[in-house]
Image (cartoon, rainbow, N blue to C red):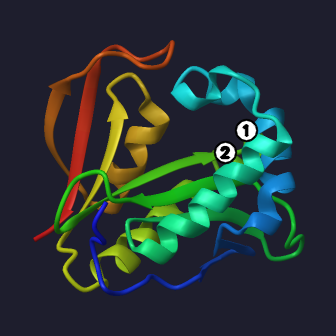
Amino acid sequence: MRPLTTGRPPELLPLGGGAHLRRRRVADAAGLNAAVLANLDHLRPWMPWAANAPTLPESEELSVRGEQVWDEGTDFMYLLGLDAEPALVIGGFGLHGRLGPGALEIGYWVHREHTGRGLATAAARALTGAALALPGITRAEIHCDESNGASAAVPRKLGYTLDRIDAATPTAPAETGRKMIWVTGA
């Protein structure tokens, strides 16, 4: 895949309130694995990749690939953490290049014990700014199933526009097959 931008977003994005996004590194694989395993029941309804519990070697492989795509300029993977506990992983976020030239899709999940605190909104706000500051990126999008009210609340709070609802084959158990496409930027 060709790089979407010649730039790179910041590796650390302070969110305020004692939280931050940091670039996902191979050294974070064990923390990421533990967080995903602790949240499988919370993630399975919405995340197709949560259908099976990842092994530590799978999380390490995913982290290696995450570093590669960052360096290639096609995807930028982050972990949500707390300033007071730097090694703790309480969520995963990304700027994904799967939309094509000029756009990045923001994806996210937050640990079940940390939902409802505005962390997803703060992180998506920071990622929106980081994405739109990159050379050649003029649009950010957030996609979620119509029935995922918590996920849809994030772009709504950030002032994204609901561009459309597309028919989509469900890929996770709670999905309806109606994908909301939220857009901001040019």
67 vs 168: above or below: below
Is any part of residue 117 visible from this angle? Answer: no
Say which amino acid is labelled 2. Answer: Thr
Displayed quadrant of residue 93: bottom right
Q: Nearer the viewer, residue 184 or 47?
A: 47
From the image, which quarter does the N terminus lie in?
A: bottom left
Q: Residues within 10 Å of mark 1 (few under 14, many from 20)?
A: some
Residue pointed to by mark 2 = 115
| Residue 122, x across and y down, in percent | 52, 66
Q: Quadrant of residue 160?
A: bottom left
Q: Which residue is mark 1?
A: 112
Measuring 28% from the left and 78% from the top, which residue is drawn there? 5
Q: Would residue 104 appear left or right of 43 to someone viewing this image?
A: left
Circle 2 packing at 10 Å, graded few (<14), some (14-19), many (20+), is some
Residue at figure coordinates x 85%, y 61% from the top left: 88
**Picture layout, residue 144 above or below residue 17:** above
Circles 1 and 2 in contact, beta carbons < 8 Å: yes
User: Vertically, is 57 above or below 184?
Assistant: above
Image location (x, y in percent) of residue 113: 78, 42
Q: Nearer the viewer, residue 35 or 116?
A: 35
Amino acid type shown at disc 1: Arg
Q: Is residue 23 left or right of residue 154?
A: right
